[in-house]
Amino acid sequence: MKTLLTLAFLFLSTVSWAQHDCISQSEMQEIAQDFKQFRNLAGQNFCYDNSENSNLLASIMFMRKTAFSPDMKNSSDELFSGRFSSSWYKYFTERINDINIPRNCAKGVAAYVYGFGSTMYVCPMLLTANYTALDRASVFMHEARHMDGFRHITCRSGPRAGLSGACDNKISDEGSYAVTVETYAQIAKYAVDLHPALKAYSMSSAATYADETFETPVRVSKNPILLIMNQTGQFYSITLSGQPVIEPLGQSPSVGRIVMRAQHMILFPEDKTLPAKYVFSKNEGDIAQTAGDAILEYNAQSPQQKADLKDMFSGAQWNARVYTNKIKFACDPKSADTTDVALTQGELAGNILHLDGYKRESKTSYLMTTSGSVLEFGCTNNRAFVKPSNIQLNQKLKRAYKIANRTFAINFEGELLELNQGGLAKIQLPAEVGSIYEIAPQQTYNFLNE
């Protein structure tokens, strides 16, 4: 039976990482002993060149060389048990000694094994400059776990409902998705000498897989917060449980719109000469990576073309790009086809309002037009639609999110509002916060953030 890992449902991508420019002769000698396809490179220096073999080797080196804190304590929840933490490379090579690159992979498939033999099949999509060695290492560990007899199931509920082989039953079964969560959590919490932005990326990835790939919800100690970006690009957090606390965080590399992609944030700068990219809120810095094919396409456009894209929605099985007078949908997770649907006659797109919360399993969302009306859009049964909504608001909103049963919004005057039965009420913020440019939902994780 073939077991596989698909990444398309997250609509995520990143670029390759390597600790050094070249692999030494001695390292290549050892790698060649473990993987037969590299025997012709035994005893030679190998320098990275972004080829498929190069990206494979960068991933193998990540597994060999990434160091972790000697004292790795388990979490009190289910994010990290330490069961796979001792030696990734040893665990992997005890199960896999051959890596094959097939040319007929289905859309979104990153890698797979057959559950017998010792060959792992890595699809070309995973070996481009759109994925990090960090991501590949997690995929490799995931696939190696299948060799111990663990299989996936069809998701019955949640963001991946109906997708065959995209879930495990529960994390305590210690299957392949448990390994995925563990490896990302271990990198986020305990990796040493790793770029802070990569660790932040790993934290979001661990949380995403914990949220989306198990039929039995994973027990994770977390707290919702509201993230604010002011007009100068300064990030602040507002806790939503207990007494609200406003805390200054880091500085955004530029002021811009934030689009959520699972637990990750993508920044679309107001300055259209700048590229869209992953953004982190605590001065973790940048990662030289592309946040998906849609972002790669966006970054290749002229500033005038970029200005036509107003917003984006990223669901677990569909996504939508909102342009001035249309929405481009990708409704089928198994197909690369897209569908353009025009907005209601005379309406122009404003911004997406997450009035029901940003839910990856949701089939619909809302769009505020420049006239102040609200449209509903989404994908049902793999078919796109845009239609008028019965929601009426007494002012134009730039953004809205429902978080922890409270709905927050900002208007075009830069005021933070809360939507309740009485309408929109202004929330007073400290004077130093100033005018608000963007808001986004966030989580703090007791184990990862402590």
Image: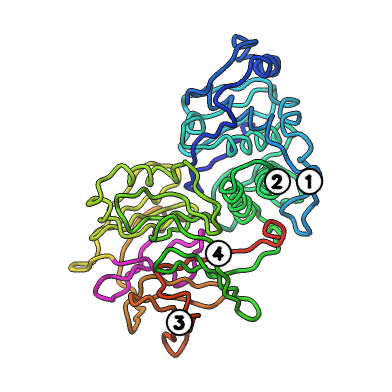
- Per the rendering, the mark at residue 317 is none
Disc 1 secondary structure class: loop
Q: Viewed as shown, does residue 56 lie left or right of 145?
A: left
Q: Which residue is mark 1?
A: 82
Q: Residue furthest left?
A: 346
Check the image and report above or below for 260 versus 184: below
Give the Cα distance between marks 1 and 4. Answer: 30 Å
Check the image and report above or below for 302 versus 215: above
Answer few, some or many: residues within 10 Å of disc 4's Cα (few below 14, many 20 plus, some between 14 and 19): some
Give the Cα distance between marks 4 and 3. Answer: 25 Å
- Range shown magenta: 350-378
Answer few, some or many: residues within 10 Å of disc 3's Cα (few below 14, many 20 plus, some between 14 and 19): some
Q: Which residue is mark 3?
A: 419
Do the CB atoms of the residues marked 2 and 1 lie less than 8 Å apart?
Answer: yes
Q: Residue furthest front?
A: 432
The nearer-to-camera label among 4 and 2 is 4
Q: Viewed as shown, does residue 188 lie left or right of 172?
A: left
What amino acid type is highlighted by mark number 1? Answer: Gly
